Amino acid sequence: MIPPPGTGAFLNAHGWGGAAVRPLAGDASFRRYFRVVLADRTAVLMDAPPDKEDSRPFLAIAGHLNGLGFAAPQALAADLDQGLILLEDFGDARVAPVLAHDASGEAEIYAAAVDLLAALHQHPPGDTAPYTPAEYLREARLFPDWYLPAVGLTEAPGYTEAWAPLWPALFTHPPVLVLRDYHADNLMLLGRPGLQQLGLLDFQDALAGHPAYDLASLLQDIRRIVSPALEAAMIARYIAARPGLDEAAFRTAYAILAAQRNIKILGVFTRLYVRDGKAAYPRFHPRLWELVSANLAHPALAPVRAWFDAHVPAEARRGVAVGVAVPAQ
């Protein structure tokens, strides 16, 4: 992976001239990441092409989180015209690979992640756009817009209407900052005390919404299986940390948001394959369907479950086959 044009001049201008620039793992966006090494100093260079990525929300949310005492990467330098940002380096101890190597600390790490959410949700969301019913629906519609054509189906009537009675349950709690991709691949072990023991990544799409969203994102992880027992224990831990919470309303919202998120991701991962040529993503479809099947069993999801039962047969729930030509949108 070659660093973007202008990297050398950017680093020279900010005191990192002559540094080595090494590629790091990226994410599902157009952003790319590099580690910058100069003597005993390191930083992370984020390349976010300005014609494809707006980095201003990332910087704003990072500042908000750091101001509240949480650990988001500090911006060391930025050139938004080029889409280059130099960030504090959180190291390599991402929670997912750490637990893949040694799962003995799983319960402790997830407890810390849940406690972080409970602490974050004590604060107002700041100057963050709201998660609206229109946005929840737009996301849910990624399933019929992308997944269904990829498995040879057309959308049957009633999909939008099936979701409509569920949205009010997501507005029974004052809005909190929803990071939207809060899971083991976006959490770093920093070895710091208190709220900064976990470093936060990939929060630039944050919105103000229901507190159950990020909990569902953490505990119904697509890439890393969280056992039902651990999921139940961590939901109970979160509820215990928020004594004023309406538990029944929270659990209903959790079920709805878990379903909405997983159904959305079926569409997102199909789009990444069909439109962007990223062949790795269909391998997650079987795991997603396991989660969706469990999600739809909740009584609150009855209208959506009825639509799926009527219009998405079992053979269409096996995922998109890699290498099969599918219609681009």
Image (cartoon, grey):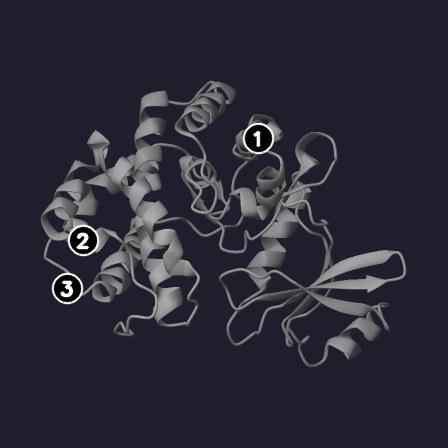
* Residue 53 located left or right of residue 148: right
Label 3: which secondary element: loop
- Quadrant housing the N terminus: bottom right
Who's the residue at 89% across and 56% down the image?
40
The residue sitting at the right extreme is 39
Residue displayed at 57% across by 33% down: 113
Q: Which residue is mark 2?
A: 315
122 over 161 or under it: above or below: above
Q: Which residue is mark 3?
A: 154
Residue 76's place in the image compared with 18, above or below, is above
Q: The C terminus lies in which quarter of the figure?
A: bottom left
Task: For the residues labelled 1 and 3, say whether their Cβ atoms are less than 8 Å apart.
Answer: no
Residue where numbered disc 1 is placed: 106
Q: Earlier in the sequence, mark 2 or mark 3?
A: 3
What kind of residue is marked 2?
Glu
Which-is-in-front pick, marks 2 and 3?
2
Counting residues from the start of the chain, the first of labels 1 and 3 encountered is 1
Of labels 1 and 2, earlier in sequence is 1
Q: Please tell me whether mark 2 sits on a helix, a strand or a loop.
A: helix
Q: Residues within 10 Å of mark 3 (few under 14, many from 20)?
A: some
The residues tagged by marks 1 and 3 sit, at their Cα atoms, a distance apart of 42 Å
Mark 1 Cα shell of 10 Å, populated few (<14), some (14-19), many (≥20): some
Give the number of the mark in front: 1 or 2: 2
Please provide percent x and percent y for residue 265: 36, 53
Q: Quadrant of residue 305?
A: top left
The CA distance from mark 2 to mark 3 is: 14 Å
